[in-house]
Amino acid sequence: MVAAAWILLALGIGHTLYGLVWFRVPFSEVFREGFVNKFKSNESRRSAFWFTIFGPLLMMSGHISFYLANTANRELFLIIGFYMLIISLIGILALPKSPFWLALIGSLVFIAAGYGWIN
């Protein structure tokens, strides 16, 4: 079950770092202009914000999953796994050439942990 938690934590770190690098121009503009209320002005800034802020949410989910692994809460691993499965399948259908394939693998690990097939 710890492997599943590491997957979410790693995805979150990767999402954040990739967002900061990929969207470095919109972020640098926003910080130069004062940050507050500066993301609404154009699509690239909004995309930068939402893509990058999703990383800490994934990291938070990873930390929660470490807690679940320590308490052996398989039921919640299963629930998270099925949410991840649905989200990743929708993401793959919407954007076939995207990293949603990694989330699909992660969802299968969570489901396996939930059923007790892996520890």
Image: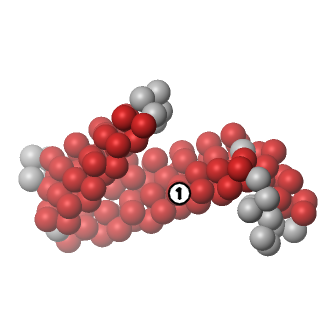
Q: Which residue, as the protein is rendered here, is positioned at the far right?
A: 32
Residue 87 percent across, percent down from the top left: 34, 49
Q: Does residue 2 appear in this view?
A: no
User: 76 or 91, which lies in front?
Assistant: 91
Q: Is residue 105 left or right of residue 14?
A: left
Q: Secondary structure at mark 1?
A: helix
| Colour pattern of the rendering | secondary structure
Residue depicted at x 69% and y 40%:
22
The image shows residue 66, relative to residue 117, as above or below, that is below
Residue shown at 33% from the left, 55% from the top? 5
Residue 105 position within the rendered picture, expressed as x and y whole percent measured from the top left: 30, 38
Residue of label 1: 54
Viewer-nearest residue: 79 or 17: 79
The three-letter code of the residue at mark 1 reads Phe
Characterize the local packing of mark 1: few (<14), some (14-19) or many (20 or more) Cα atoms within 10 angstroms.
some
Which quadrant is home to the N terminus? bottom left
Horizontally, residue 115 falls left or right of residue 36, namely left
